[in-house]
Amino acid sequence: MVQQCNTIKNYSKVVIAASITVLSSFSSHAFNVPQQCIVAPERTTPCPNLTYTSLNVGSTNRIICLCKTDKAQILTLLNNSSIATQRIQIRKLQDQHDLSSQQLKLLFENINK
């Protein structure tokens, strides 16, 4: 009886280890989840309302993480970039997320449509 319990425990450990390996492999290869979400440059606290969407870039779809709370701030920044500091903030967002101004605008305009 004791030997049977040990066999079941060992089997359970193997199944759990295999499951973790498979799931971690699946998640890292099947979905390229962004490491950083698009947030307003002024944000100093974690975003309370994140959303994920996809964007067709060339022949692939990218998963993009957006802070819904910052929608108005980012659209204002993209639509009214007359001040040099605003243009710099836009360029930083573009470079940081490898997106154009048009792509950023499209993403935020389509939230909750």
Image (cartoon, rainbow, N blue to C red):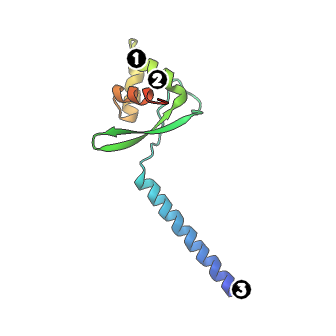
The mark that comes first in sequence, 2 or 1, is 2
Disc 3, SS: helix
Rendered location of residue 24, percent (x, y): 49, 58
Q: Residues within 10 Å of mark 2 (few under 14, many from 20)?
A: many
Distance from Cα at disc 1 to Cα at disc 3: 71 Å
The residue tagged 3 is 2
Rendered location of residue 103, percent (x, y): 36, 30
Distance from Cα at disc 3 to Cα at disc 2: 63 Å
Q: Quadrant of the N terminus?
A: bottom right
Q: Residue furthest left?
A: 58
Rendered location of residue 16, percent (x, y): 57, 68
Q: The disc labelled 3 sits on which kind of residue? A: Val
Q: Are marks 3 and 2 in contact (CB under 8 Å)?
A: no
Q: The disc labelled 1 sits on which kind of residue? A: Asn
Quarter-wise, where is residue 25 in the image? bottom left
Distance from Cα at disc 2 to Cα at disc 1: 9 Å
Q: Are marks 2 and 1 in contact (CB under 8 Å)?
A: no
The answer to whether 66 appears left or right of 99 in the picture is: right
Q: Are marks 1 and 3 in contact (CB under 8 Å)?
A: no
Residue drawn at point x = 63 percent, y = 82 percent: 7
Rendered location of residue 66, percent (x, y): 48, 34
The residue tagged 2 is 74
Q: The disc labelled 2 sits on which kind of residue? A: Ile
The residue tagged 1 is 79
The mark that comes first in sequence, 3 or 2, is 3
**Is 79 rendered above or below residue 12?**
above
The answer to whether 23 appears left or right of 62 in the picture is: right
Disc 2, SS: helix
Disc 1, SS: helix
Quarter-wise, where is residue 8 in the image? bottom right
